[in-house]
Amino acid sequence: MKNLLKRFVKDESGATAIEYGLIAGLLSIVIIGAVTLTGGSLTDVFTSISTQLDSAVATTGGGGDATGGDATGG
């Protein structure tokens, strides 16, 4: 039993995989936390961009065709 315990303590196989797993878990927690904290701000930014694009398209008429010309066909 004593030898088994010594071998278990000395055996480092799989330690790297466990370390990578812990690092991945920690990074996941950090990323989720960052997205949660900035989620409202990101929504506001994309809403603002969408509003500006909508008003720009409405102002210009949103013309153009598949060939890259303007709405009048030129």
Image (cartoon, rainbow, N blue to C red):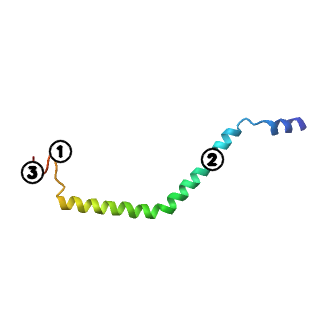
The residue type indicated by label 1 comes to Gly
Q: Position of residue 52 (x, y in %)?
A: 28, 62
User: What whole-number distance in Å separates the C-alpha atoms at marks 1 and 3?
Assistant: 11 Å
User: What whole-number distance in Å separates the C-alpha atoms at marks 2 and 3?
Assistant: 58 Å
Image mark for residue 58:
none
How crowded pointer 1 is (Cα within 10 Å; few <14, some 14-19, many 20+) is rated as few
- Give me the residue at 64% from left, 42% from top: 20
**Vertical placement of residue 40 versus 10, above or below:** below
How crowded pointer 2 is (Cα within 10 Å; few <14, some 14-19, many 20+) is rated as few
Helix, strand or loop under label 2: helix
**Vertical placement of residue 49 versus 2, above or below:** below
Q: Are marks 1 and 2 in contact (CB under 8 Å)?
A: no
Image mark for residue 68:
1
Q: How many marks?
A: 3
**Vertical placement of residue 39 versus 9, above or below:** below
Q: Position of residue 21 (x, y in %)?
A: 63, 44
| First in sequence: mark 1 vs mark 2 | 2
Q: Position of residue 40 (x, y in %)?
A: 45, 64
**Residue 46 shown left or right of residue 22 in the figure:** left
Image mark for residue 72:
3
How crowded pointer 3 is (Cα within 10 Å; few <14, some 14-19, many 20+) is rated as few
**Residue 62 shown left or right of residue 50 in the figure:** left
Quarter of the N terminus within the rendering? top right
Residue placed under numbered mark 2 in the picture: 23
**Vertical placement of residue 51 versus 70, above or below:** below
